[in-house]
Amino acid sequence: MPELPEVETFRKYLLQGESGAPSILGKKIDNAELLWDGTLAEPEPDEFLSRIQGQFVTGIGRRGKNLLVNLSRDCLIIHLRMSGELVVEEQTNPLGKHYRLILNFNDGFRLAFINVRKFGRVWLTEDPSSVIGQLGPEPLGDDFTPESFHQSLQSHSRQLKYFLLDQKLIAGLGNIYTDESLYRAKLNPARKSDSLSVTESQQLWESIREILREGIQNQGSSIDWMYQGGDYQKYLSVYNSEGLPCQRCKTPIKRIKIAQRSTYYCPNCQPLPE
DNA sequence: ACGAGCGCCTGTCGGC
DNA sequence: TGCCGACAGGCGCTCG
């Protein structure tokens, strides 16, 4: 599910808390409960449960779509994949059907990792780079510049959709924000990355950063937009808008498949140059 | 190097 | 109402 803005929203939620849910910063982990073994990428369940016990939460970070919960000794890395959620709540609350991992803190609260489709993964490691070391640049980071991005685009001959979804080339974009960024930059998702001019690369660079920043802003007021199946579409321009008029030119939005993913674009604003 | 196809899982929705 | 296929925000693998 979540792409960079949603993971960032969860990061802030864990760090700052929110209506009834306290920050988990500084809390001590009494114990953990593993409710579905497949949740753990590493280490083995026995080692995980014994090792995490007694550690303190010393920081909450994010790299791409990975959430980094820094502990006194290890780093707990959480990837929510398609349907993961995180909730901080009192330990007396009943467990939901899709709860997969729980960290019980020594103050009566817990962190629950909820994951309907079981794609999400958790790592407990002393060396985060072994998990996230291959990721591409952080799109909102300082080292992601128009120049470096153009250079990267030029060094591959990939369809833009494929390029932007590849976490080794840029970290944090998923199916929604990829389409939204390409729409704003008026670039066809099937364009080859090495066909972009300097100006087009710059436009895409700006669009990606704007779209992600706006996404982060909007999550602040609608953390559960995706889980409530609700009104998130009011923030999006093309995703899931097949047949609806383009906001710029009224041409019906098209849906095609690229990378086995639904891909939405305006055939008029985002033409494929021959 | 690139991209298609598939598997991993569960749930929802629309058509018949 | 029930059944059945399509689809879902991710990603790793194989194969041509």
Image (spheres, coloured by chain):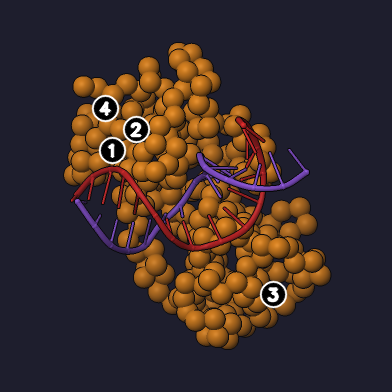
Chain colours: A orange, B red, C purple
Dot placed on the residue nearer the N-terminal end, 3 or 2: 3
Residue at horizontal 53%, vertical 27%?
Answer: A241
Determine the chain carrying the residue at label 1.
A
Q: Nearer the viewer, residue A262 or A173?
A: A262
Residue A265: quadrant of the picture? top left
Determine the chain carrying the residue at label 2.
A
Residue at horizontal 39%, vertical 43%?
Answer: A260
The residues tagged by marks 4 and 1 sit, at their Cα atoms, a distance apart of 18 Å
| Of labels 3 and 2, the one closer to you | 2
Q: What mark, if any, has residue A189 been given in the picture?
A: 2
Q: Give the residue pinned by disc 3.
A: A104
Determine the chain carrying the residue at label 3.
A
Q: Is residue A129 left or right of residue A272?
A: right
| Of labels 4 and 3, the one closer to you | 3
Q: Give the residue pinned by disc 1.
A: A159
Residue at horizontal 20%, vertical 32%?
Answer: A195
Note whether A108 is above or below A22 in the view shown: below
Q: Give the residue pinned by disc 4.
A: A199
Mark 2 and mark 4 on one chain: yes
Counting from the top left corner in percent of width and height, residue A253 is at 46, 22
Determine the chain carrying the residue at label 4.
A
Q: Is residue A32 left or right of residue A261?
A: right
